[in-house]
Image (cartoon, rainbow, N blue to C red):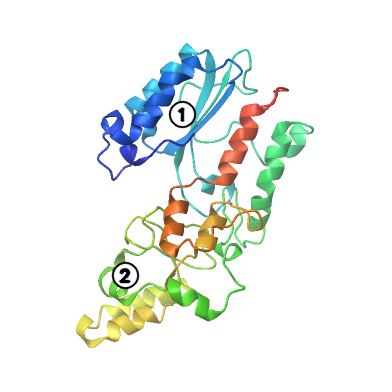
Amino acid sequence: MSPPCQPFTRVGLKRDISDNRTCSFIHLLRIFPHLNTKWKYLIIENVKGFEKSEACKALIKILEDLDFCYQQFILSPSMFSIPNTRHRYYLIAKRRPLYFNFPLQPHIMESLPVPLNTACSFAGTVYEKMAALNSKHKCLVQGNPKTSEGTCYYLNHILETDKSPNYFEQFYVPDRVLEKYAWLLDIVGPHSTRSCCFTKAYGHYVEGTGSVFSPASPDVIANAFEQSHLHSRDTGAQLELLRGLGLRYFTHREVARLMCFPDQAFSLPSDVTIKQSYRILGNSLNVHVVALLLLLMTAGDNTAC
């Protein structure tokens, strides 16, 4: 489940259960006690901040009343070698007599309870599957000159390299944004190992909605911004310097790759606009993180979900 996040977002009004958008979630909580006892599993995803809400307290109370054991997490794809920061609240729960194969913690965990780099220690178990699943991202890090634990792979691994230059024209940051808001942009390049969280307002609002891409080196970018300060906006020289950086928004396919949607199995309908694509992906979740949690949740269970 992924209830509407707007009542709990950092930049929102934080109206919590007073927000009408929580009505559907509260309704589900009310009917949970009346569901068939064959219902054994639950996974919840929401924005960081949900854990402090009255809605979360109501969820926890229902789970405890129904004899579910549970564990809460705050996780980000960047913890799993993926160069994107997207901290989200997760809860996994299962109904007793089922139990988790790791010690439950009363606090919110900020990492998985299983080290994913030691698959050999868990041969033949779900944990081995988790390590194998994570290895497809981890192995991309090995090409980085300065590899260390926690390092993410380069962004060039998710770039669309099979498109013509004309294709990317629709993604260039418009002049009106460069003129007024270029200094607010979070700029990353092909050898960056990070990117900011992409929200549904990506491409519409500038600050805090996601990173933009430049093929230029960090030194060239820094020099362009330094030189632009020497020119008046009225002369056009400032804009020309910034245009030279080739700043563009990540394509919807590139954003989907950062969120670990598979190229072959996932695509949006052809009549969906770029703006709609960003809204859909901004409201979505990271597939890889959820896949790991699903494996963790069902570890040791012979019963199908």
Q: Is residue 197 left or right of residue 7?
A: right
In terms of depth relative to the viewer, which is nearer, 273 or 81?
A: 273
Residue 57 placed where, x, y %? 37, 22
Q: Is residue 109 left or right of residue 9?
A: right
In terms of depth relative to the viewer, which is nearer, 173 or 213?
A: 173
Q: Which quarter of the rendered picture does the C terminus lie within?
A: top right
Residue 224 placed where, x, y %? 36, 78
In terms of depth relative to the viewer, which is nearer, 225 or 15?
A: 15
Q: Which residue shows up at 47% across the image and 19% down it?
A: 32
Q: Which residue shows up at 34% across the image and 32% down it?
A: 22
In the depicted structure, whether residue 169 falls above or below residue 288: below
In the depicted structure, whether residue 177 falls above or below residue 5: below
Report the amino acid beneath label 1: Ile
Question: Please, what secondary structure does the residue beneath circle 1 have?
Answer: loop
Asked whether disc 2 touches disc 1, contact meaning CB atoms under 8 Å apart, the reply is: no
Q: Which residue shows up at 45% across the image and 52% down it?
A: 280
In terms of depth relative to the viewer, which is nearer, 212 or 143?
A: 212
Which residue is disc 1 drawn over? Answer: 108
Whichever of labels 2 and 1 marks the residue nearer the N terminus, that label is 1
In the depicted structure, whether residue 127 falls above or below residue 83: above
Q: Residue furthest front?
A: 271
Q: Do we see residue 27 in this rendering?
A: yes
In the depicted structure, whether residue 236 falls above or below residue 305: below
Mark 2 burial class by Cα count in 10 Å: few <14, some 14-19, many 20+: some
Residue at mark 2 to residue at mark 1: CA–CA distance: 37 Å
Question: Please, what secondary structure does the residue beneath circle 2 have?
Answer: helix
Tag count in the figure? 2
Report the amino acid beneath label 2: Ala
Quarter assignment of residue 112: top right
Residue 160 placed where, x, y %? 58, 68
Which residue is disc 2 drawn over? Answer: 182
Mark 1 burial class by Cα count in 10 Å: few <14, some 14-19, many 20+: some
